[in-house]
Image: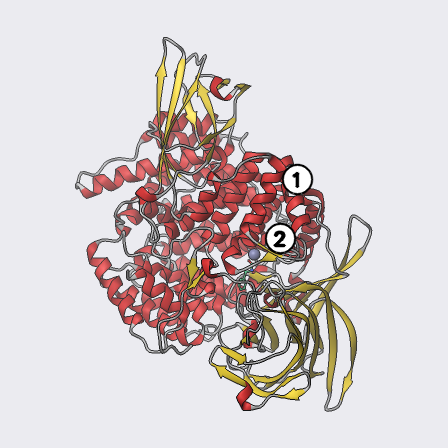
Amino acid sequence: MMRDAEPKVIRLQDYQVPNFQITKTELHFNLEPTETLVTSKLQFERNAKSENKSAALELHGQDIEIQSLKINGEELTDEQYQVNPESLTVFSVPDVFEFECVGKINPQENTSLEGLYKSRSMFCTQCEAEGFRKITYYLDRPDVMSEFTTTVEADKALYPILLSNGNPIEKGELDNNRHFVTWHDPHKKPAYLFALVAGDLSVLDDTFTTSSGRDVALKIFVEPKDLDKCDHAMTSLKNAMKWDEDVYGREYDLDIFMIVAVDDFNMGAMENKGLNIFNTSCVLAKAETTSDTGFQRVEAVVAHEYFHNWSGNRVTCRDWFQLSLKEGFTVFRDSEFSADMGSRTVKRVEDANVLRTLQFAEDAGPMAHPVQPPSFIEISNFYTLTIYEKGAEVVRMIHTLLGAETFRKGSDIYFAENDGTAATIDDFISAMSKASGKDFTQFMTWYRQAGTPVLNVADNYDAENQKYTLTFTQSCPDTPEAKSEDKKPYLIPVRLGLLGESGPLPLEISDLGISGVTDTVVEITESTQCIEFSNVSEKPVPSLLRSLSAPVKLQFDYSRDQLIKIMSNDEDGFNRWEASQQLCVQVIQELMSGRQSEQPVAVDPNLVAAFDRLLKDDNLDPAMVANMLSLPSESYLAELAEEIDVDAIHQCRAQLKKTLAEELCESFAQRWQKTPATVDYKADAEQIGLRSIRNMCLSYLVASGQEQWFGVAYEQFSSANNMTDQFSAMSALVHSDSELAESYASKALAEFYQQWSEEALVVNQWFGVQASKAHPNTLEQVKALMEHPAFTMKNPNKVRSVIGAFANNPVCFHAIDGSGYKFLADQIIELNALNPQIAARLLTPLTRWKKQTQQRQALMIEELKRIQSVADLSKDVYEVVSKSLV
Ligand code: PHE
Ligand code: ZN
């Protein structure tokens, strides 16, 4: 963590094959909280492909106290090697040899949660991306793949369960109440997929029979108190295993698949071979303690990690510049899985929301990078929305362009050609190209250029000749690595249709040989390009970029009438939602300009009427109605703004919500009344839809400010049989800006804590709702929460739910006195020493100063500079801070 010089920039163009391979890796762990002894026996061979045939052996390693080093059984003398803070060099080695190292590490003091560490009473590991080097000296790079045999030895009473990758091959008792288990993983793997767990754990057991008839033992290990919260993860796992066989032809390849839940974890979960380690927040679920979004997250993450067994483990990444090869593809796979398990349109809306608020903001910020970044300082900073979500969108576009069948052919070729190897994004594209015969040269722009493309569309209707023309113009804004004018045009797949007075119009595009359909995909490849439709009998309303067919910002000058038409008539459910959002955006923006010119405007009655029709529509999927009634978030509105006025956004959005609530009070009440509360909780699409429309109505009714609804919400809060209903009701009360609601809200908050004080994940939700409240007192409240006995800076989930939630609370974080910025900077400085990864992630909101007002910019920059001046800045924080000050 200490730096003397500027940290080194790692570049893709400098990639070189490793000088050595490690054919076999034998590890022995003698687990003790403060001094664990790790003995490694590694079989090295010079790599035939290496250019340097006499290279020294240079191993990665960090914070390891060396006890002994041997080559072919001979202890090394001091002259034979050199130890640096992050490496060990053995000057002269033979072509084939055995290297043995005994090293001492301290899991107890490891608060970075990388390498081997303790989470509560458990030992666990996290090795991706470069954590293995904190366990033992190694070639810690994904293109070095080895066969692992691991013996874990520990106190038998404290750690009855000892796990590692693969299959258990031996176990036994030892002196001093200790025992051991030896695991062997037959599949070669890079070190980042290594895992070890030791603890006093309970297990949920099940089995899955693969399509070829093999039985796989499934085990979910948790702390005993959580054993009642594993069923949903187990069901999700079995569904995912079946889905990957059905949709991708991929079978599981070991006799045992294990999941372990740990409390202290930097990310969501990790796909270690045969031994996935999960953040408790992504595996535990139970109706009483977990909301619908929680259930859905568990299903998605369990599937995601399972799918990595093929897209990530069987075929891994050559280097970390290829990260999106496994992550983009796997997110696409888990997103399609969730769509198949629940409602496809709702899932698409959720994904689009994440992409357009969070990823687009990343693309516009100082850390913007291509899906294949050309360089990095700290790879942990590149587990981003761009690598994951935009990467998934890029794979989705390939799927759209090729069609499901050809895409599947391509994925079969990809797995067949690269199985057991460390591959590149180009290998993936080459397989897709072989399957389809398509030239992907231009498409690669999606991997190599940063920034969100803007797709501007204008239309023209020639009534006389019945011709309709759409003119597409694309551009991509400046990003840190390239100017807009130097960027190449993208290949943008645009799914579209045309709406006439009485329904969809048939599409005839003679240039493309398209006719007789009402929905098609056109490929936009030029900076400016026209698409001409013939035999168009009336001036249509274009429905563009259906299902968000490309991760771009669409600009089309829709009138409100046109939006209302799409909202009520389009064949594409996604675009109906999108039209409702754009309608709200227009109305909120109108309120904002009225506010700015001090000439207040009224809410457009057309929007009110459209919402009324939605509320009364019984034919639409309730979940979609709820989504359409849900106003664009403050962060999405900020994303759309040239200069962000957080207060105006907050107030105008709240004003719209209140107006809708007041004017449609009857309709909201009716819809609420006729939607029954669900009885036997299920996290299926139907019930989730019902709960979401019911709670959406309740949130409007509370926003109307009428006290009777505070009583109703409180009643729902106290009598709910599931967390979705309980939390939604409390949240509506907490976020109400009516003073009358305050007593209800504080009563609910107090009772909620009383009820759930033993459930850490629920307490985190309780932290989060308080830290996100738009109220002048919130910062004080947040500081008080950090003194709460349930809070600790060492647990990332708690840090995220208090500090993270506050930093993403637009109004309070951006308080004009700079108090929010100062507070965050103080926390970053503390976290920098404890957990650099979390510190760097949490810093993000402070780096997004470019679109804030001048006064705020100055305050934000001042705090960034204060962080920059801290001694012992981690690489993680250094990279983010320095890039944000350019
Ligand atoms: N590879 C993990 C996933 O996406 C994420 C992760 C990265 C977890 C780094 C821990 C550390 O599934
Ligand atoms: Zn992943």
In the picture shown, does residue 777 fall above or below 871?
A: above
Considering depth in this image, is 731 or 477 the residue closer to the camera? 477
Residue 268, given in percent of the width and then of the height, sits at: 54, 61
Nearer the observer, 548 or 401: 401
Can you name the residue that lies furthest to the top here?
464
Q: Residue at x 40, y 14 (%)?
A: 467
Locate the C terminus by quadrant: bottom left
**In the structure shown, which secondary structural element does the residue marked by tag 2 occupy?**
loop
Q: Farthest residue to the left: give it.
A: 598
Q: Position of residue 374 (x, y in %)?
A: 43, 56
User: Which secondary structure, mark 1?
Assistant: helix
For label 1, count other residues whose C-alpha is less than 10 Å away and answer few (under 14), some (14-19) or many (20+).
some
| Spot occupied by residue 772 in the image (x, y as percentages of width and height) | 38, 58
Q: Which residue is mark 2?
A: 311
Residue located 41% across and 58% down the image: 745
Horizontal side of 258 relative to 472 (left or right) equals right
Amino acid carrying label 1: it is: Lys
Q: Amino acid at mark 2?
A: Ser
Q: Quadrant of the N terminus?
A: bottom left
Q: Nearer the viewer, residue 636 or 489?
A: 489
Q: Which residue is mark 1?
A: 409
Mark nearer the N terminus (2 vs 1): 2
Residue 490: where, in percent of width, then height?
42, 38
Which mark is drawn over residue 836? none
Which residue is located at x 26 percent, y 50 percent? 645
